[in-house]
Amino acid sequence: MPELPSESEGGGLPPLPDDGISQKKMEDALRSISTSWLSKIKQAEKHARPFREDAKECMNFFDGHGDWFWKKAGNDSRDYSKIGPPSFRMTINKAFEAVKLFGSVIYARNPVRTVTPRKFPVITPVSMGIDPTQPPQVDPMTGQPMQDPRIQAFIDLSQQVGNIEEMRQAVSGLMEAYLNYTPVELNLKEHSRRVVDEAIIKGMGVWWTELVELPSAEPGQTYGIVGSFADSVDNLVLDPDADEQEDILWCAKRCIHPIGEVASQYGLNREDLKGHLESYVARSEEEDRDYKTKKRNGKTNDLIVYWKIWSKTGFGHTLKGAPQEFQGMFDALGQNCYIVVAEGVDYPLNCSKEIALEQPDESGLPPTLFSQSRWPIPFYSDISSWPFTPCQFHRKPGYVWPISHLKPGLSELKFLNWALSFLATRIMVSSKTMVGVAKASGDDIKDQILKHEENGFSIVELSETLGRSVGDIVSVFQLPQVTPDLWQIMQAVMDMFDKRVGLTELVYGMTRNQFRSAAEAQVKSEQISVRPDDMANALEDAMGVLARKEALAARWLLQKEDVAPVLGPLGAEVWDSMVQNIEVNALAREYDYRIEAGSARKPNKAGKVEQMQMALQTLGPVLQSLIPMGVVDPFNNLIVEWAKSLDIDPKGFMIPKPPAPPPPPPAPADGPPPAEGGAPSSDGGGGAPPSGPPPQVPPELSPA
């Protein structure tokens, strides 16, 4: 019979064993989290390889080495020619033309952002069962009309709706002012041009919405400001299980920074990250293409490559392949988690072992672990929203990655590089002059042919004893000419590439045939802008989403001290009292964030001048008729817009406002008061109005 547990020294039963998570189990769980996410990132890189290879090839056509097309290097090199390469190797940079022509048109300046509150639908009293034509009911006790309680409810609700809409209007004004300030302060134009160029070349460009600290006017003080910044799409990986971008459950961003900076940011010891260098260098030395392309040698500092992961599928303990023993261990962290991992580090950088082993709360996990694993900005509150905003012009159905703008014309571009290189080699060979000399002519004639010429002439003296003509002794070989068919083929292929990419002659401002009518010119002008307009619309949609994310981040991160330099003291107080009290998801759904149409494109000066000339001819005479009545503002506004279209100063064309009418003369101090209504009395003085009504006019004297 087993012995019963004895009583403790203080009396009672001994304490129960501790059911908490042991240190070893927690360390093993964190190691499992880190390795599981690194494995998923590697799978995501493999899933994105077709997109990466096309992007790399298009980037080489844009800015590759002069002979990259012919040079085989690495395991992923492509053999573009089955015959020996030509002596003269060239690369036609049509990609550069496409980037500069389209990029400079669709994004030439920072767009104007507008924030519009969504209004409630108009509700009439009839919809609430109130009939305005029906007479009110009478109280049988007092005989007075009774007020319908529905009418008072309608009035109260209408006032409530009015107050809500007025509050939303104030919030939208503040948010619009802030969103139009940050692009200039944070140089959004430069970042957006990088994004647009990469979207044209590779297929996708990416903005990341983040918080930065800027120096304040106070010495040693800083204030936060939210902005969007460009980063290469090569540093982005997406969930490989998703077929469309809207279906992804996690994304990751590759970051490369000095080890000391990363250790300070996450409160780690520098020595704890040394294992990353050894692991990363070892992997990069293997025959692993992914790690070779990701390796960067720090010239000034030791660099660490780490991944920031935004997950909507938990902390990582439920990923496929994760150990079963840790299932449910991190369920208290929820589905929306933020994890930072690095190769060779056995725990997430933002959730170190020291944090994970702190005293747990009722959820079974430390509160610091919960706070450290939260998204820095809760973009998950908006539908299908992530910290990055893609700029892409050509989505690929059934694949999470888009296609490059240049990819449809790559076959033609490869042929042009191949054909022109061989043609240049042929021209180089054809430029040589081959002279045949009879062997019996002797070395004297050969020396005369090879000697240095003067003034472009060479004189060859022949001896009469040879007994033969000059043509029998010296002859120049004629090499075959380049056939015109080759030029026609190359021109046809170049036209095919231009149609694929959109580099038609009208984009360059050229035309082969003269327009026969103004209608033909207008039709061609409209058709040539179809593709740039579509790309500009895609860019404006992406910029609208970007403004929405910046507004959400500003609401979440900024206090009144941060917005005071932008909105002023009064605006900062309203921000603190109104904006800070709005729910984050309400800020995303109750306001529309849009870009003014065409505000990011290069302005069409000729079209603007033509529009203003037509406006002057149409509205000028109408508004000019108001000037004699003293209303000059409408005509002056028209003059300002007309002068703005011509880039001239409108001050010299403005109509001055008429002087104010003189004040009425003061009444005499000792005179009687004027009659009521300002009408003088019959005797020239003031007087009281008659007490009774005026006498009735007889019907026969009333006007017809």
Image (cartoon, grey):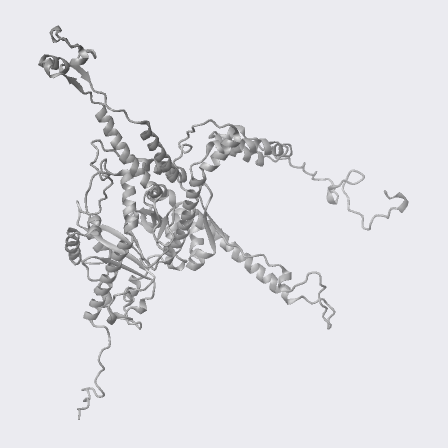
Residue 129 visible to the viewer: yes
Residue 274 position by quadrant: bottom left
Residue 640 visible to the viewer: no
Residue situated furthest front in the rendering: 467
Please, is residue 232 above or below residue 90 in the view?
Answer: below
Residue situated furthest left in the rendering: 443
Please, is residue 588 above or below residue 527 in the view?
Answer: below
Number of marks: 0
| Left or right of residue 535: residue 450 | left
Percent across and percent down for residue 411 are 31, 41
Nearer-the-camera pick, 454 or 426? 426
Q: Quadrant of the C terminus?
A: top right
User: Residue drawn 9% across and 13% down?
Assistant: 442
Nearer-the-camera pick, 644 or 87? 87
Residue situated furthest bottom in the rendering: 1
Percent across and percent down for residue 20 are 24, 74
Residue 185 position by quadrant: top left
Nearer-the-camera pick, 381 or 115? 381
| Left or right of residue 255: residue 110 | right
Nearer-the-camera pick, 668 or 339? 339
Percent across and percent down for residue 408 are 35, 43
Q: Quadrant of the N terminus?
A: bottom left
| Left or right of residue 84: residue 639 | right
Residue 279 position by quadrant: bottom left
Residue situated furthest top in the rendering: 464
Percent across and percent down for residue 394 are 38, 47
